[in-house]
Amino acid sequence: MDWRDKIRRVLELDQTELALWSEIAAGAPSEKLRAIIRAMMEREREEMRALQSILTSHGGWYPGPAGPSGYPPYSEKD
């Protein structure tokens, strides 16, 4: 299985997970607990957005444009 297919599978599982968390939140006994679950769901959505951006970035993850020299992500390694 191609790595992109695996990411798509993770996204499918995340969708299922979000649906379950939504049901759990609906039955939670307090507003505080519902708020915690909603925050967890938002973090899951953020992860899903990151995975989606990986899939749409020309088939893989590429570094951005060259930055100023000496800046750690762009500096050459000795």
Image (cartoon, helix red, strand yellow):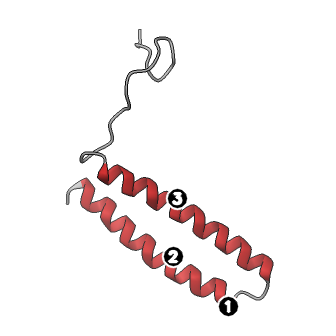
Going from N to C along the chain, the mark reached first, 2 or 1, is 2
Residue 7 quadrant:
bottom left
On screen, residue 60 above or below 30: above
Q: Which mark is residue 18?
A: 2
Label 1 neighbour load within 10 Å: few <14, some 14-19, many 20+: few
Residue under the image location 65 percent in, 88 percent down:
26
Q: Quadrant of the C terminus?
A: top left
Residue under the image location 30 percent in, 46 percent down:
57
Q: Amino acid at mark 1?
A: Gly
Q: Is residue 62 found left or right of 48 in the rendered image?
A: left
Label 2 neighbour load within 10 Å: few <14, some 14-19, many 20+: some
Q: Which mark is residue 27?
A: 1
The spot of residue 44 in percent (x, y) is: 53, 64
Q: Nearer the viewer, mark 1 or mark 3?
A: 3
On screen, residue 78 above or below 58: above
User: Mark 3 falls on what kind of element?
Assistant: helix
Q: Amino acid at mark 2?
A: Leu
Q: Gap in Å between the C-alphas at discs 1 and 3?
A: 24 Å
**Which residue has dot 3 on it?**
46
